[in-house]
Image (cartoon, helix red, strand yellow):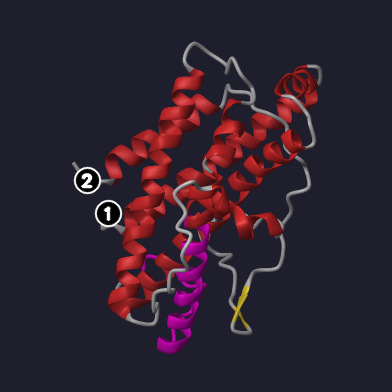
Amino acid sequence: MSVRAPVSLACASLLLASACASVAPKRQHIIEIETARFDGVHYPVPEALPPADQPPPSPPEDPRLASAESFSPAASPLPVAAPDLHNAAVRDNETDRLIRGYLRWVEEMYRVVRQLSLGGAMADPLALRKWHADEAGDMGQLIEQAAALEGAFVDLAQAVGVDLAGVLQEPGRAGRVRLLFRLTACVRRDLAERTRDGLDYLDARRRGVEDAELRAALRQDSARIDKQTEDLIRQTSATLTCAQLAGRALGGP
């Protein structure tokens, strides 16, 4: 069985299960911002593609994301030299590592949400948010890897004359470069929003706010519950989009 089949099934089931779930409150200030620049070059945002091909919106820049990997207990204390992403073989290897790492993360999230959602709505509205906090380190490493590759594909597109705003279906190098650029942007944005959610929870705990207070604040405000449900559905849809791009990059149609 191909990698795409279980991932697509898992993500579709996740979206269905999440629609009836409630999670902890999130701030409502996520907005579109100017696309990131690499080496002074402002790359275009695709506008003419179907919604399924678009990466999720870029969340606001958050300085906490730069140190998110420090939450990982497995983080190496020694500096590691950055791979030379201008080398085609190295770039291909790093892209494959990112795709497979992200798909493993998606499968784990599906298992967590499915377990929490058995029997109806989540018993603990903070459960997914706390899991985001636990995963902040691993997500931070994937974000860093995705951002580096995103910049490398911008450089590659300039070097070979590929318009990143073109269609993904174009055969040959052009379509492949566009696909990988949009995939890495999608992964970076998806995980950045989820990491921010986990860091918001950790910030609240550092301020002395107990889980019971967070749960009570959510349950006493039906509008916040509705907003959290909408946010969860939107997040899950963004993850499904990224997983579909990842499956395509691994060789699917």
Q: CA distance from mark 1 to mark 2?
A: 8 Å
Q: Whole-percent x and y of residue 37?
A: 63, 76
Q: Residue at x 32, y 77 (%)?
A: 173
- Characterize the magenta stretch by its predominant secondary structure: helix
Q: Is residue 99 visible?
A: yes
Residue 162: % across, % down: 44, 81
* Residue 63 falls within the magenta-colored stretch: no
Residue at 35 percent across and 73 percent down: it is 91
Residue at (81, 21) in percent of width and height: 221
Residue type, mark 1 in image = Gly
At label 2, the amino acid type is: Ser
Q: Residue at x 72, y 63 (%)?
A: 33
| Viewer can see residue 56 | no
Mark 1 touches mark 2? (CB < 8 Å): yes
Spot the residue most to the left. 1
Q: Which residue is mark 1?
A: 252
Apparent side of residue 120 relative to residue 218 in the rendered image (left or right): left
Image quadrant holding the N terminus, namely top left
Q: Is residue 188 left or right of residue 98?
A: right
**Residue 84 occupies quadrant:** bottom left
Q: Which residue is mark 2?
A: 2
**Between 117 and 55, which is closer to the camera in this rendering?**
117
Instruction: Tell me if residue 149 is in the magenta stretch.
Output: yes
Element type at mark 2: loop
The stretch in magenta equals 142-170
The image position of residue 152, as x and y in percent, is: 46, 76
